[in-house]
Image (cartoon, coloured by chain):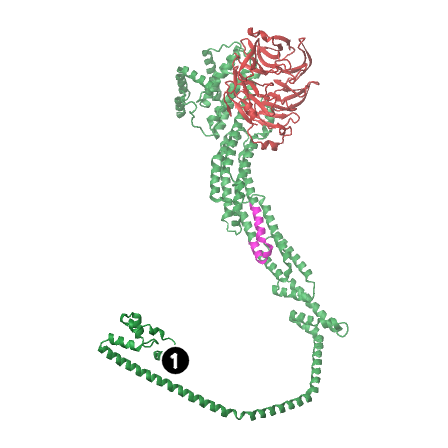
Chain colours: A green, B red
Amino acid sequence: MAGVSAPSPMDEKAKRTRDLLASFYTNNSNTGSGALSSPATASNLTPRTASSLDSINSSSFDPSSYMSLLVQKSNLENLLQKHVQMAAEIKNLDTDLQMLVYENYNKFISATDTIKRMKSNINGMETNMEQLLAKITSVQSKSDSVNTSLFEKRGHIEKLHRSRNLLRKVQFIYDLPSRLNKCIKAEAYADAVRFFTGAKPIFEAYGDSSFQECKRASEEAINTVIQNLQGKLYSDSEPIEARAEAVVLLKQLNFPVDNLKTSLLEKLEDCLLKLEDESKDVSVGEISKTFRAYLIIFPDSEQRLIELAQGLFSRRYDAARDQLKKRMPSVDLLELLRTIWEDVTAIDQVLPEAALPAFSLESMCSIIKQHILIAFSHLQHEISDAVAGSQSKSNEGKEERDLQIVLENGKKVVMQGSLDLLVEFQQFFDEKLELLPKLKELITDWVQEGFQEFFQNLEKHFLILSGSSTNNGPLGESSASDHLTQSPDKLPTGLVLVMSQLAVFIEQNVIPKITEEIAASFSGGGVRAYEYGPAFIPGEICRLFRSAGEKLLHLYINMKTRKISVLLNKRFTTPNWIKHKEPREVHMFVDLLLQELEGVGIEVKQILPCGVVKRHRHSDSAGTASTNSSRSHPNVTREDKLASSNTQRARSQFLENHLAKLFEQKMEIFTKVEYTQESVIATVIKLCLKSLQEFVRLQTLNRSGYQQIQLDMEFLKAPLKQLVDDDDGAIDFLLKEVNNAAHERCLDPIPLEAPILDKLISAKMAKNRDHSAIPL
Amino acid sequence: MQGGSTGIVYGGLKYQARCIADVRADLGHTSFLAGTLSLKEENEVHLIRLLPSGNEIVCEGLFYHQNEIWDLKSCPYDYRILSTVYTSGETYGASIWKIPELSTQSNSPQLEQLVSLDEHTAKIKSVLWWPMGKHDKLVTIDERNIFVWNIDSSNKIAKVISQESVGMLHNFSGGAWDPHDRNAVAAICDSSLQCWDLRTMKNTNAIGHAHIRDVDYNPKKQHIVATAEDEFGIRLWDLRMSKIPLKELPGHSHWTWAVRHNPEYEGLILSAGTDSTVNLWQVGTGSEDSTLDSPQSRRIRQIDPLLNSYTDYEDSIYGIAWSSQDPSVFASLSYDGRVVVESIKPYTQRK
């Protein structure tokens, strides 16, 4: 449109101008909007119509209504003002229009001028063009003539050039030997090989005729090259790159490199073998370097190298396993494993394809597992040594003193040994070795399994030691000779007791402790399938040892009673009871019996705890107070007891009822054995007395025989009570039962009179006192 | 496991007693013979019968027997014939008796002595009948000798046909006759069990180092015996492999006195002991409890072999007997003279 190129200050103005022009050209297009505001509706003007009335620039502007509205609305002053404003605006618009017309006219004039100038310029061009064409044709003809004149000479030059090149090549071939030698001198083998391979096709084509001499010479030279290269390859001192290059060159010369490779690898293998023999002479670092070199030198040798590396480490692990066979501390094992592992990582960096870590993991697994197993079996040996080994050392008199020591030793070995093992295995976890954390669960399982098996084996071992689970020669009860021949297989009875107590100790102390420790540091695991549950089941082991302890205790009691039974059997089967002589003294079998029982007492007292006095069976027993008091005052012994028994005698009626009640309640003699001195001794005594009763029942006695038994039993009362508190009256009862049995089996049961009985007993006691006084 | 007082008690024996025997030949009745052991009084033999209702025992006959009875056996083919071994003071003897007609039971008749087996020079221990039926021979064992008699009970003749001494070093204390082999007798010696062949009268086999109180052949399986021992409780042996027992059972808290196989139910064993209990054991089941029972299979069987322990006794029990008429019934005799008849039905049905 118009040349309104002025920026923003002129914007307002330009816009208005454009609008005005636009409204001018499109006058009739939209007048409808202004017709809306008819004079009829002017009285109630809406703001919209008012505004449209105001907008003087819109196309629907109605000057007459605008006027009337203005006149109605404004006062004179306003009208005057409006008038001035409008007059100014009109003037402005006038000048704007003038400016527009002027500008357009100017442009028109300058366009006319330009057209005129163009016309005059084109007139001279035609002649210039014709001149130019003539000149170009002349140049072309001249160049053609030159070309034809030079053509012959150019062909000749080309020929000359070709023959020169050929000559140069021939020269090269002839120079080759000397050049090669020069290269050899300069050790530029690469160049030599390049030259030779370059010349090779020629030698192949013409080597037999014209270049024979030359070929031989250069082949000689190249042989030297090959030799040198081989030497280079074999020498370890050369840098790896040089050696690799040598191999490449040799290969280019079609030299059989594979032979070289195998020979080199064999050398390496020898070297590795030597490494094991004179361990540590060659460090693994060097080996790994060699490996890397070979890997670079012979890229296709990897398979072989892998084999070599695996062979090396499997030998290392085998060696470690060999060392395992003797018990070694975990620390040493770890040290060993660590060195191997370091070597493995070193080689692994060079040779990752060998999968050495996986291989090591496997090997370590088995080694550690084996280690754990060995550790446990070793511990078992230690324990059995502690228990059974002492037997050989202290065979005779010392043995009894040693029982307690043996027990303590056994306890210590079991407890300390197990804990030590745990601590030792703990080291596997503390170790920084990279592999071990992976094995943690496995190790946990192994340790748990190890303990489980260890305790199971220990229990079996105990039973085998005690001879109760095997049939190694039952003892002939009646024949002492049998007893002697069988005894070497058996442990001393005391040791059975020791093992029994040890089993209890394991059940009550060791297992809980171990369980605790395992829970603390070896929990988890769970590599094992879930249906198997945890590997270490303390409940099961406890049960095992509880029953083992009981078994051993019973075995002990059995062994003891059997011995006494032999004694009793002799006593009752040898004499002719029907022709028994009048009793003159207490029979000496009583001494033997008491001696055996005391032996039991001595053994038992060393090992078993002193039991609390059990009253629950007969809490209303008359003897309670007296036995307790005699217990608390060890100095006040038999007199007090006799006194208390006197008070008991006063209540004999009660006692008899009591005994009758006992009888009705069935005998108390087969009560459960407890792990106390009293319980064991009492059980042995009860069983012996019961046997005594049964032996008596098998005989037929005359009066004297009956009296003898009466006397013996009467005598036994006091010493038996000394051995153990007869707190439930069972021993009294059984002594009486023996008496009763004798009474029943007697043809003429008239008991000895009390004074004679007393006299004989006190005589015996006096004799015993003398007897015991002498050795003291 | 503790048996209550389920048994039927017969308290008719007035004195101590050791011997009770099943009356095998009394067809149709569950009967037992029991003999007393009293030094001073006149002893009795009671023929007792379990009524068909199964809950009452009656005394079918009471016969006086002058001397105390240490061994009592019923003839396996004639219910009216029985044998006793007795002592009186220093004297001893063994006889075969015939029970008089039962119609005169009211006045306690004397037993009719058929034969007195009085060739013995040492204390007689036991009289053995061949347990499976009629056989014209009888074996007696005294402390030193083993006798084989030819018996003709109808003519009241007994003849010793062979005799062998065991030697001075040993004492016999009892024995059992192999039900599978009429020529084999197991005799209990001091420290062994000896098997005798009655044809040659030679000791053919022995289980050594065993102090045995009682022995019983398995009536269903040849070569298998059970022994009751002081040390090892009850052990089962195959006589062909006498080194190692097939099985061991713990036995009793004190001596195991007697052991008996059930005549019908395989593997059921009854034992009695001086701890006043009778134990019922179950060893193995059926055919797998074979003679070639390997140690492995023994170990596998972890079940408690003790089926029940009958504890309702007040004194040592020396006599037990299964009834061959009703194999689910046994009688036990404690020293105080009480006979208790128990049914093991609850345990046989459980299988």
Characterize the local packing of mark 1: few (<14), some (14-19) or many (20 or more) Cα atoms within 10 angstroms.
Answer: few
Mark 1 residue element: helix
Type of amino acid under label 1: Tyr
Residue A276 in the image, given as x and y percentages of width and height: 61, 52
Left or right: A337 in relation to A186: left
Image quadrant containing the C terminus of chain B = top right
Is A191 above or below relative to A674?
A: below
**Subunit ID for the residue under disc 1:** A
Q: Is residue B221 visible?
A: yes
- Taking the image as drawn, is residue A636 in sight? no
Q: Is residue A366 magenta?
A: yes
Left or right of B277, for residue A252: right
Residue A492 at x, y = what percent? 55, 29
Which quadrant holds residue A87? bottom left
Q: Nearer the viewer, residue B278 or A424?
A: B278
Image x and y of residue A497, in percent: 51, 30
Q: Residue at horizontal 30%, vertical 82%? A: A90
Q: Residue at x 62, y 60 (%)?
A: A295
Q: Specify whether residue B101 is painted magenta.
A: no
The residue furthest right is A209
Dividing the picture into quadrants, the one containing residue A610 is top left
Left or right of residue A655, residue B305 in this image: right
From the viewer's side, name the closer residue of A288 and B138: B138
What segment is highlighted magenta in the picture? Answer: A342-368
Q: Residue at 55% x, 8% y: name it.
A: B42
Residue occupied by mark 1:
A25
